Image (tube, helix red, strand yellow):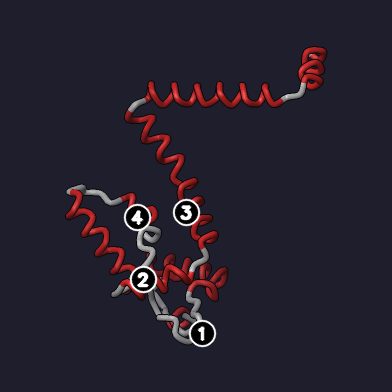
């Protein structure tokens, strides 16, 4: 880019769009050029992630073929979490499973489940709004009763006096 930008000389009379494009490119390159084309110097790190992307592309195509759905948006959201292990044999799978501590696995599964809660809620709200709102209200009532029962009598008396 350092050689390309100064070597470009568009004619202002014929190509005004090229001049604006070159000016925009120069501005962006000066602001954040070193961060745009960053390369990692790590031995064994592949230069791109094309194999990984093609693997998840095959998974999405297979999911469309199996389910008959046109969209695989759910797989785009967290398709990486659906493929946890790749092994050719049971002993290899067992060795991969044993590498990860169970506490870490459960913690990540819990985070994944928590991230899915809003989507599940809106899906239930969309498909059955009355039951969803009733469940929400009953959950609120149960929680508020539990909070009021856990208060000590002195807290309840103080609350009555402050009202």
Sequence-wise first label, 4 or 2: 4
* Real-space CA distance between mark 1 and mark 3, rounded to the nearest whole angstrom: 32 Å
Task: Using residue 142 as the reference point, say whether residue 69 is left or right of it.
Answer: left
Residue 76's mark? 4
* Mark 2 / mark 3, whichever is N-terminal: 2
Q: Position of residue 87 (x, y in %)?
A: 32, 72
Q: Which residue is mark 2?
A: 93
In front of the other: label 2 or label 3? Answer: 2
* Mark 3 neighbour class, 10 Å CA radius: few under 14, some 14 to 19, many 20 or more: few
What residue is drawn where x is 38% and y is 53%? 77
User: How far is disc 1 from disc 4 in space, using C-alphas?
Assistant: 29 Å
Q: Nearer the viewer, residue 148 or 126?
A: 148
Q: Which residue is mark 1?
A: 41
Which badge, 4 or 3, is on the more N-terminal residue?
A: 4
Placement of 96 over or under 143, stated as above or below: below
**The C terminus sits in image quarter:** top right
At mark 1, the secondary structure is: loop
């Amino acid at each position: 880019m350092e050689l390309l930008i100064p070597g470009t000389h568009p004619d202002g009379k014929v190509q005004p769009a090229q001049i604006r494009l070159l000016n925009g490119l120069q501005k962006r390159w000066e602001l954040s050029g070193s961060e745009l084309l960053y390369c990692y110097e790590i031995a064994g790190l592949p230069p791109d992630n094309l194999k990984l992307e093609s693997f998840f592309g095959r998974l999405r195509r297979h999911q469309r073929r199996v389910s008959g759905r046109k969209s695989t948006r759910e797989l785009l959201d967290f398709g990486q979490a659906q493929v946890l292990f790749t092994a050719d044999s049971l002993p290899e799978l067992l060795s991969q499973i044993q590498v990860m501590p169970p506490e870490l696995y459960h913690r990540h599964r819990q985070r994944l489940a928590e991230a899915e809660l809003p989507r599940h809620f809106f899906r239930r709200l969309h498909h059955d709004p009355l039951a969803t709102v009733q469940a929400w209200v009953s959950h609120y009532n149960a929680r508020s009763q539990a909070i009021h029962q856990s208060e000590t009598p002195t807290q309840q008396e103080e609350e009555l006096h402050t009202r």
